[in-house]
Image (cartoon, helix red, strand yellow):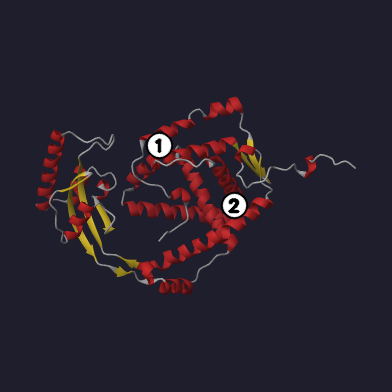
Amino acid sequence: MTKTCLSLLVISLAACSPAAAASAQENAPKDKMIELFGDPVIAKGKGIEIKRSQLDSAMVSLRAAAAGRNQPLPPNAESLILRNLINSQVLLSKATEADRTRGKQLLQEALERMKGDSKLTDAEFNERMNVQIKSQGMTREEWDKQSLDQTTIQASLERELKVEVTDAQARKFYDDNLTRFEQPEMVRASHVLVATRDLTTNQDYSDEKKAEKRKLAEDVRKRAKAGEDFAKLAKDHSDDPGSKNTGGEYTFPRGQMVPAFEAAAFSLGTNEVSDVVITEFGYHVIKVSEKIPAKTVEFAKVQKDLKEDLKQQELQKLAPDYIKKLVADANMQILDEKLKLPEEPTAQPSPQNAPATSR
């Protein structure tokens, strides 16, 4: 179940890619380009102006994010990003001080959830956040501002569109869709990964080095079997950046992990340590902490998130027409013809600048 509608907050806390880091360097000549070529207004409306530098900054972040996911940009990316900037600006123009206060609260709640889910200390969480934000070509200050804008927009939409979901509505949805709340059998397990390839270059180690790694994995297994703190073994020896700082722990159903890892984890008893398990990533030592049987999650545990989800679904239905009206009311015009989407009309002269008609 989703907990909030924050596009800027849906970011991975995994290590960033080298390609994304290179994209961040595109910001360096920005001021020089503005000095040389100016910073023209590319879209405007009542009380709203969007300049070329704003679009360029947004494109740097988009390119960095796409590079990190190894995804191409759509051919009309600039036009789509400009449309998003326009929508954001007209929505922010409707925000009240109460919306901004509520936006700060929503942002803080989202960050606390992210930190809790990652099971990191405040310092570790902020370090990972800063690395990932930099990989997107942004500073922490820029990310904070844009994230706050998004949560303020959410608060403003909730107020303007007056969307409410009652407990009775949530209960009816739950009762009508019980299969959606079925939780499959899961296992809570920790592992130590001893990698057999360089995680930076993705190149396999030599046979000699793999033998050394196998020896290390066997040693970790023996120490785990002897009762050493498994979380400490993971922090000291695991090469899995996604879990080592949380003691190597994952909770997962069948079908989520690579087959050899999954088979070993589901075959172990509670508190049992595996033999060395070999996967494409290297050597794993696995310890199971809990076997979680399949069940239907009771309504009380999903009620809050379900109400939020249903509210977000309704907002998504109502928002497009509302935004379209705001854009029209603001008389927003895209001044650069190359940035218009195919369905958008060519800019018409405003009445005061229209040519005189012949009589």
- Compared to residue 287, the image places residue 26 above or below, namely above
The circle drawn on residue 20 is: 1
Q: Which residue lies under the disc numbered 2?
A: 91
Marker count (numbered): 2
Around disc 1, counting alpha carbons within 10 Å, would you say few (fewer than 14), some (14 to 19), or many (20 or more)?
A: many
- Compared to residue 246, the image places residue 353 above or below, namely above
Residue furthest right in the image? 359
Q: Position of residue 202 (x, y in %)?
A: 27, 36
Q: Position of residue 323 (x, y in %)?
A: 61, 54
Choose mark 2 or mark 1, whichever is in front: 1
Please give left or right for residue 227 compared with residue 75 in the image: left
Amino acid under disc 2? Leu
Q: Residue at x 50, y 53 (%)?
A: 151
Indicate the quadrant containing the N terminus: top left, top right, bottom left or bottom right: bottom left
Q: Position of residue 218 (x, y in %)?
A: 11, 45
Q: Secondary structure at mark 1?
A: helix
Could you tell me how far apart the alpha carbons at marks 2 and 1 are, in whole angstroms? 30 Å
Can residue 250 be seen here?
yes
Q: Position of residue 123 (x, y in %)?
A: 34, 44
Amino acid under disc 1? Ala
Q: Secondary structure at mark 2?
A: helix
